[in-house]
């Protein structure tokens, strides 16, 4: 049985005891639209497939600006407040008497009393990032009340409000558009782009898919599509299809994910995918709901119309024979794929298949290449490399071959390469659970504190994975495989103030510094004003740290000393010191 990755940041352990059990289907009239003074429009919808996760809510446009009123969708109380440079940034969690919780993310500012509480807690804890659970009843809200201002904080690439509705006891997140809670103009049917077919054979008793074949699609009228080529399609004795598609909504240029996809064979439904909601410990199953290599190479959805045994996600109301299509030589079958968006608009692709009389795909055994059974633990040991993949980490059987390459000359000359490059599976092989990788290499003593494992892409670009050098090597648990190597980074982060030393900031709201790192990323940043710890808000997307003045902060009309220290994840530290007039 698969072990699940628990996303602790999504858990609200206190709520189940505080509130009644949630209704199975919330009353859509219970909630109001949570943004005031903006055109009703979305930039992302629920269930979109992202790298390693589904999108857990809707992203509501705020007319391209920050500072729009964020309104309580219903009466309730604030049960969690988050301030973080990543994820949702500044976020509020509001529990409601009907047993649901609404989430508001990427905020710029909280309601005044909440803002004061958060600031006091950050100073009390001396932490820039805080995850707070205020006492019950401390911050009540009324439907339609302004509880925050919209923003662009956290992992956000443009101003918007991330909004969710969750079932409080389970924290299962719900599809608010399909449920009718969020309504935006949409009469555009999904766009069907390509069809892919994968024949399946067995190798050592394990199912192995052949390289896929792709077929273009053309629209004939309205939401009806046909194959742009051979019809019927010649197929193998057993296989499955992948639909590559996307969706649009009125008045916006964004693309969206599909809500439901149904496959009919000879007039009978044999497969249906429907995204009504999911639990956070299920979110990584997006890697197997999709055809992962196609998904990561495209901005479109690549939905697999089949269910591997490893897929435990409860989003398939109809599944026969796991969605696999059997077709004997000369047999003709009629197929229809219906794609539906969260507003009820539909498109369909109709085509025929015929069993090929040619020799079916055969997965040849290779004595140098092993096939990993995902239900069993796998280990590969070499002098300088050890790889362990736990049972349940892989979604389906994969061919395994370790290849060692000579040390490369990296494009980034600030890094020192310390080992050979090892090819372990592929970046296109998703993992549900992390593998354990050990790379051993001789490292000079002065570089050991700065050594880490990295992955290298086809263009020679290195990306940080992590790890600490001990006893001649680095051992790391990671879900990222492919081309792995050990490097050392001795370059500290860069800090550059956006004001001159001794500048007059008496009329400014605060100050900011540019911050970035060449490789591993910022691990921590700390500021002191006149020797006292001071809050810094970090914006990792734009590479800025900001301090906002508060009346209690500093005496005015005086020169104050500022020290900011930043460290990266490879043990390098830098500081900037200067002064300003307040």
Image: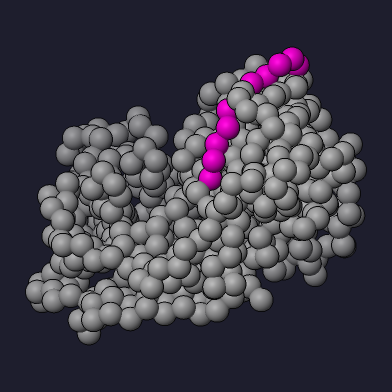
Image coordinates for residue 379, horizontal then vertical, percent: 42, 80
Left or right, 171 with respect to 529, comes to right
Q: Residue furthest bottom?
A: 471
Observer-nearest of 221 and 245: 221
Residue 214 lies in the magenta-colored region:
yes
Q: Is residue 164 visible?
A: no
- Residue shown at the point (74%, 57%) measured from the top left: 322
Residue 582 vs 230, above or below: the answer is below
- Residue shown at the point (49%, 32%) measured from the top left: 158
Image coordinates for residue 242, horizontal then vertical, percent: 63, 43
Residue 173 lies in the magenta-colored region:
no
Left or right, 461 with respect to 201, comes to left
Observer-nearest of 358 and 186: 358
Left or right, 237 with respect to 393, comes to right
Observer-nearest of 380 and 160: 380
Q: Which residues are magenta?
A: 212-222
Q: Quadrant of residue 522?
A: bottom left
Left or right, 390 with respect to 524, comes to right
Dominant SS type (magenta): strand
Quarter of the picture holding the C terminus: top left
Q: Is residue 498 visible?
A: yes
Residue 17 vs 304, above or below: the answer is below
Q: Quadrant of residue 579?
A: top left
- Residue shown at the point (64%, 65%) measured from the top left: 310
Quarter of the picture holding the N terminus: bottom right
Observer-nearest of 67 and 501: 67
Q: Quadrant of residue 443?
A: bottom left
Residue 251 vs 5, above or below: the answer is above
């Amino acid at each position: 049985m698969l072990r699940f990755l628990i996303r602790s940041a999504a858990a609200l352990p206190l709520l189940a005891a505080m509130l009644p059990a949630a209704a199975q289907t919330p009353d859509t009239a219970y909630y109001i639209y949570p943004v005031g003074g903006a055109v009703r429009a979305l930039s992302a919808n629920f269930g979109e497939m992202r790298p390693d996760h589904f999108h857990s809510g809707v992203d509501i446009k705020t007319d391209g600006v920050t500072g729009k009123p964020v309104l309580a969708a219903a009466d309730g109380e604030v049960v969690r407040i988050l301030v973080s440079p990543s994820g949702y940034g500044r976020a509020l969690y509001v529990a409601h008497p009907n047993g649901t919780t609404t989430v508001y993310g990427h905020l710029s500012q909280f309601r005044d009393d909440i803002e004061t509480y958060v600031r006091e807690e950050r100073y009390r804890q001396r932490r820039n990032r805080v995850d707070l659970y205020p006492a019950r009843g401390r911050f009540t809200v009324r439907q339609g009340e302004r509880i925050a201002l919209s923003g662009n904080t956290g992992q956000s690439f443009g101003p918007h409000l991330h909004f969710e509705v969750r079932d409080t006891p389970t924290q299962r997140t719900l599809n608010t558009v399909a449920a009718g809670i969020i309504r935006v103009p949409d009469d555009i049917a999904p766009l069907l782009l390509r069809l892919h077919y994968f024949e399946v054979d067995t190798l050592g008793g394990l199912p192995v898919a052949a390289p896929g074949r792709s077929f273009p699609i053309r629209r004939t009228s309205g939401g009806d599509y046909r194959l742009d080529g051979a019809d019927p399609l010649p197929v193998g004795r057993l296989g499955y299809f992948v639909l590559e598609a996307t969706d649009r909504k009125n008045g916006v240029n964004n693309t969206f994910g599909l809500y439901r996809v149904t496959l009919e064979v000879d007039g009978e439904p044999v497969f249906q995918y429907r995204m009504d909601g999911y639990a956070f410990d299920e979110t990584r199953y997006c890697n197997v709901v999709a055809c992962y290599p196609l998904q990561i190479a495209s901005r479109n959805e690549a939905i697999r119309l089949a269910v591997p045994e490893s897929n435990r996600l409860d989003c398939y109301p109809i599944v026969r024979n796991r969605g696999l299509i059997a077709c004997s030589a000369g047999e003709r079958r009629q197929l229809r794929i219906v794609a539906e968006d969260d507003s009820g608009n539909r498109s369909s692709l109709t085509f025929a298949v015929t069993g090929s009389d040619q020799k079916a795909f055969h997965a040849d055994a290779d004595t140098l290449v092993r096939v990993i059974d995902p239900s069993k633990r796998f280990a590969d040991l070499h002098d300088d490399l050890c790889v362990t993949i736990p049972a349940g980490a892989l979604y389906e059987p994969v061919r395994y071959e370790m290849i060692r390459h000579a040390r490369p000359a990296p494009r980034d000359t600030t890094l020192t390469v310390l080992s050979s490059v090892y090819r372990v599976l592929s970046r296109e092989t998703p993992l549900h659970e992390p593998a354990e990788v050990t790379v051993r290499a001789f490292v000079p003593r002065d570089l050991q504190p700065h050594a880490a494992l990295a992955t290298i892409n086809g263009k020679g670009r290195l990306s940080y994975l992590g790890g600490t050098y001990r006893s001649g090597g680095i051992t790391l648990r990671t879900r990222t495989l492919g081309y792995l190597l050990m490097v050392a980074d001795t370059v500290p982060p860069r800090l550059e103030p956006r004001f001159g030393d001794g500048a007059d900031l008496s009329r400014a709201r605060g100050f900011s510094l540019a911050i970035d790192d060449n490789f591993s990323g910022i691990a921590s940043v700390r500021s002191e004003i006149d020797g006292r710890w001071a809050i810094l808000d970090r914006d990792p997307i734009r590479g800025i740290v900001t301090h906002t003045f508060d009346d209690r902060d500093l005496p005015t009309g005086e020169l104050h000393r500022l020290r900011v220290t930043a460290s990266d994840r490879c043990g390098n530290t830098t500081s900037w010191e200067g002064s300003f007039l307040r």
